Amino acid sequence: MKKISLLFALLAVTFASAQTVWNFDKAHSSVHFSVKHMVISEVEGQFTKFDGDIKTTKDDFSDAKINFTVAINSVSTDNEKRDNHLKGADFFDVAKYPTMTFVSTAVEKVSDGIYNLKGNLTLHGVTKPITLKMTYGGTIKDPWGNTRAGLKVSGTINRVDFGLKYNSTMEAGGLLIGEDVNISCKVELIKK
């Protein structure tokens, strides 16, 4: 029995040492979104505070385990009045729901360096499964000896699915604010 326990312990240590943890280089990463405005244009914004990590055992990120958290209060659309409205009860209600989280559940290879990233998104107190496109940009050694990797994650969610229902209908028809929100995250990672 001791031999079996020792074998399992050795296997666990071997697996743990084979796992790579990647941290976000926030100075070279971004989380952007855009949404239709008055049917004819788009408003863009970003979240400036976010954190998380990615764990992999494969060099191409095809088995990535992602945990990602965004501070909703960091929303910025370059318009203070609009940002304050977004932070209020009509939209994100940051007093009740200060964070948005994404936890991956699967990575499915589409082609070399391109994957369907599946996971659970929690926003405004609602958790739903979503699928995003993840593109692996490569891995390099920087001039200071750090190992870095690049990823781009993009996709679309329907904000109404997460309880963000504020809107009005325009006189000419159509919604003042689109329901589909386009997401684009460009991240540079540093191997821990």
Image (spheres, rainbow, N blue to C red):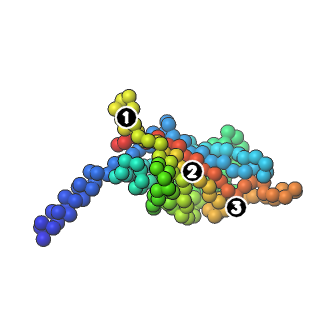
Q: Is residue 11 above or below residue 145?
A: below
Image position, residue 56 (x, y; %): 37, 52
Label 1, on which residue? Answer: 141
Task: Please indicate, yes or no, whether residue 69 appears anywhere in the rendered image.
Answer: no
Label 2, on which residue? Answer: 154
Locate residue 79: give its quadrant: top right
Q: How many marks?
A: 3
Amino acid of disc 2: Ser
Amino acid of disc 3: Lys
In the rendered view, does 6 fall on the left or right side of 66?
left
In the rendered view, does 39 fall on the left or right side of 181?
right
Which of the marked residues, 3 or 2, is nearer the chain's N terminus? 2
SS type, badge 1: strand
CA separation in Å, label 1 and label 2: 25 Å
Instruction: Identify the residue at horizontal 40%, vertical 55% (top origin).
Output: 63
Task: Please indicate, yes or no, whether residue 6 appears anywhere in the rendered image.
Answer: yes
Which of the marked residues, 3 or 1, is nearer the chain's N terminus? 1
Q: Is residue 112 above or below residue 7?
A: above
Looking at the image, the residue that sits furthest to the right is 171
Label 3, on which residue? Answer: 165
Amino acid of disc 1: Lys
